[in-house]
Amino acid sequence: MNYLSQPRRDALAAEYVLGTLRGAARKRFTRLLMQFPALRESVAMWEQHINALGEQIQPVAPDPAVWEKVKQRLAFAGTSPSNVVSLPLKTNPWWKGMSLLASAAALILAILLVQLQPVAPLPAQQFTVMQNDSKQSLWLIEITTQTIETYASKNVLQRQQNDYQLWMIAEDGRPPISLGLLPQTGLSSLPKHPLFAQLDIAALAVSLEPLGGSPNGAPTEVLYVAELAVL
Amino acid sequence: MEHEEHLRLLGKVTSGDEQAFAQLYEATSPQLYAICLKMLRRKEWAEDAVQDAYVKIWHNAGEYRGGLGTVLTWMVSIARYRALDMLRFYKVRKEEEIEDNILLSDDDVIALSAEDKKQLNVCLDELEETQKQAIHLAFYCGLSHQEVTHHLDAPLGSTKSMIRRGLQLLKRCLGI
């Protein structure tokens, strides 16, 4: 493969690390990176050299609030626990899906939320809105060409001792595949799982997990399920 | 040695030592924040990037491999990839902003004494001035080819090949 010739590999790896490899080329390279260990080695080598430049930048101390937020996100001792009431958990199994009515409401809410975004995200291909039993919107989830962009609404119950984890449920019946941890506030960009484009996705699901995510690779307690809508 | 101290702390972080993580944060966050701030150029985004980076560092501390650069370099990689993701997501900059601000001044980069000068700097000094400048702008400020082109007032094609040639020369000089 052309990509794997040594000079090509080095050139692409260097520009990937430097950050000048952008758009579709970066996406292609990221995909190849998952397939070819030789490319990963090139990237690791360039990271070692190019990123050493970062040690020479004039340091700027961040606001102390940043450390407080890091501690809160990692639920370190000494951080104040949330004073919220316990979450009413949805006990229906994820494979039962969700109603058409909820899907329609999710579509409308998602369009409203998208319009309210202050900055232009990558063009989304698919999206969904996770809702609780009271039809409150919790997360807007957008699938772009290379990432999964997630936005937490103010309705998300803050959990100091747990993480919320996002899963994709394939139509072929295989076990749910983890897509990463969802933010409890603000937004977070998750890498798009390579199987996302290859499988027919029946739904996305959110589970409640111990900090750091599922300990055994399977959802511990499924809270919410939503189908994806295509834009 | 700074690296040995970082390595000692990171080792403790792998076993969940919060105190060691706090010390590692204290020692390294000004570097990571300075990079994110330079790339994203907005305080709140830089703070978000730093937060995300340290959450990842906590969870992935065991993935650091000693043979591939210092602990700080590894941490810089994590922070820069996060900032690059955010740059793509927010499409942060407009061309006018690049003109209106000084992107990188001599004060931004710490001048190293001759004995501290790393091989990378020695090799960078062998590049043409514009080549070095283009690589610095891409690295420290997260500029794309187009943005570097705009800033250096050079044709896009020549910027691309200038960066590519510069990286090739670096590779040769670094012996990699």
Image (cartoon, coloured by chain):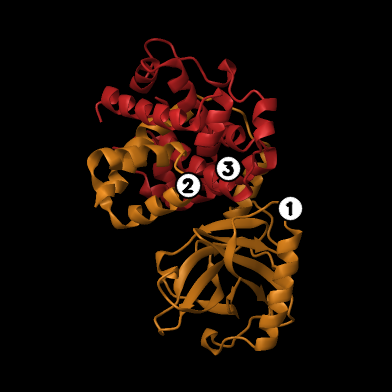
Chain colours: A orange, B red
- Is disc 3 surrounded by few (<14), some (14 to 19) or many (20+) residues within 10 Å? many
Q: CA distance from mark 2 to mark 1?
A: 29 Å
Residue flagged by tag 1: what amino acid is it? Pro
The quarter of the displayed image where residue B122 is located: top left
Q: Nearer the viewer, mark 3 or mark 1?
A: 1
Q: CA distance from mark 3 to mark 1?
A: 21 Å
Identify which residue is drawn at 65% across, 43% down.
B45
**Number of numbered discs visible in the structure rendering:** 3
Residue flagged by tag 3: what amino acid is it? Val
Identify which residue is drawn at 36% across, 23% down.
B120
Identify which residue is drawn at 44% across, 64% down.
A193
Q: Nearer the viewer, residue B133 or A132?
A: B133
The quarter of the displayed image where residue A144 is located: bottom right
Q: Is residue A108 visible?
A: yes
Tell which subunit mark 2 falls on: B
Label 2 sits on residue: B57
Q: Secondary structure at mark 1?
A: loop
Residue A102 lies, with reference to residue B166, above or below; the image says below
Label 1 sits on residue: A118
Q: Nearer the viewer, mark 2 or mark 1?
A: 1
- Marks 3/1 in contact by CB < 8 Å: the verdict is no
Q: Secondary structure at mark 2?
A: helix
Label 3 sits on residue: B50
Q: Position of residue A52 (x, y in %)?
A: 41, 29
Residue flagged by tag 2: what amino acid is it? Ile
- Image quarter where the C terminus of chain B lies is top left
Residue A22 lies, with reference to residue B32, above or below; the image says below
Query: Is B49 displayed left or right of A15 in the figure?
Result: right
In the rendered image, residues at marks 2 and 3 fall on the same chain: yes
- Is disc 1 surrounded by few (<14), some (14 to 19) or many (20+) residues within 10 Å? few
Q: Position of residue B165 (x, y in %)?
A: 35, 27
